[in-house]
Amino acid sequence: MQISLMAAELRPREKLLKLGAEALSDAELLAIFLRTGIPGMNAIELAEHVLDTHHSLNQLFSASLLEFSQVKGLGAAKYAQLQAVLELSKRFLHESCQRDTVFNSPTHVRDYLALELKSRQQEVFMVLFLDNQNRLICQKILFYGTINAAAVYPREVVKEVLKMNANAVIFAHNHPSGIAEPSQADQVITRKLTQALSLIDVAVLDHLIVGGNQVVSFAERGLL
């Protein structure tokens, strides 16, 4: 059935305006983004087909142009729009992290890091540099590859902290395997970095590991 022929309360756009975006399913939200269907499928049915094909929103947002275009009715234009939406989400969360202290917006920090790191195919180690009010100064990826004591150099982290004149930091890295549990190597390098930064009176507030749709906090686990 064409969406225009559906009852008003079942149409995604009208439902969003009346109840808010959180009341819509993934398929309904995606249908608003797609706007139109293809022969034999309305926009909602096409959205359900897209989600079935990619298995999850995470895989959909992480898909390459070639993978995205495998679904009939999708191509470069829709792919560009989807990537623009993803980047706008990252920038919104980044602004939130800059505006608020990390203690007032821990959810923003987690959401931002999840968007920033979970789709990366290579392991990266990021540092969030914070001022004396725990607001974000900037973030920077310092190391690429498997995170262990041989790959992450405390002196380089200390050098960057001094350059940014940071008062505290949050570490973050991803596990491309999708498993967010801290490894023994993760814990060892975190202790080394914490000890090195304590010598210049810089606090390590947390170390977050992003794996798939999970974010694990060292601070919450009592590992700092």
Image (cartoon, grey):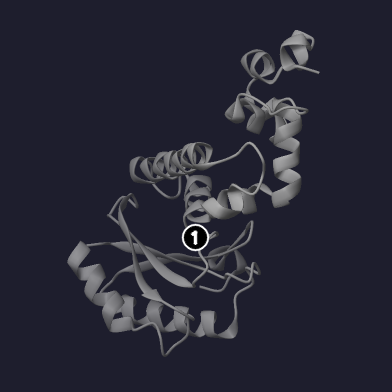
User: Who's the residue at 75% across and 37% down the image?
Assistant: 48
User: Who's the residue at 42% across and 71% down the image?
Assistant: 125
User: Who's the residue at 54% across and 55% down the image?
Assistant: 64
Q: Which kind of residue does numbered mark 1 sit on? A: Leu
The answer to whether residue 125 is left or right of residue 182 is left
User: Can see residue 96?
Assistant: yes
Foreground of the two, 205 or 43: 43
Q: Residue furthest bottom?
A: 150
Q: Residues within 10 Å of mark 1 (few under 14, many from 20)?
A: many
Task: Give the x, y percent position of residue 44.
Answer: 73, 28
Q: Which residue is mark 1?
A: 117
User: Can see residue 63?
Assistant: no
Figure check: 109 above or below 88? below
Q: Residue furthest front?
A: 39
Q: Quadrant of residue 143?
A: bottom left
Task: Give the x, y percent position of residue 90.
Answer: 44, 45
The answer to whether residue 208 is left or right of residue 196 is right
Task: Give the x, y percent position of residue 160.
Answer: 24, 70
Disc 1 is placed on an element classified as helix
Indicate the quadrant containing the N terminus: top left, top right, bottom left or bottom right. Answer: top right
What is the total number of numbered labels drawn onto the structure image?
1
Figure check: 199 above or below 104? below
Foreground of the two, 161 or 14: 14
Task: Give the x, y percent position of residue 117.
Answer: 49, 60
User: Who's the residue at 64% across and 72% down the image?
Assistant: 181
The answer to whether residue 49 is left or right of residue 191 is right
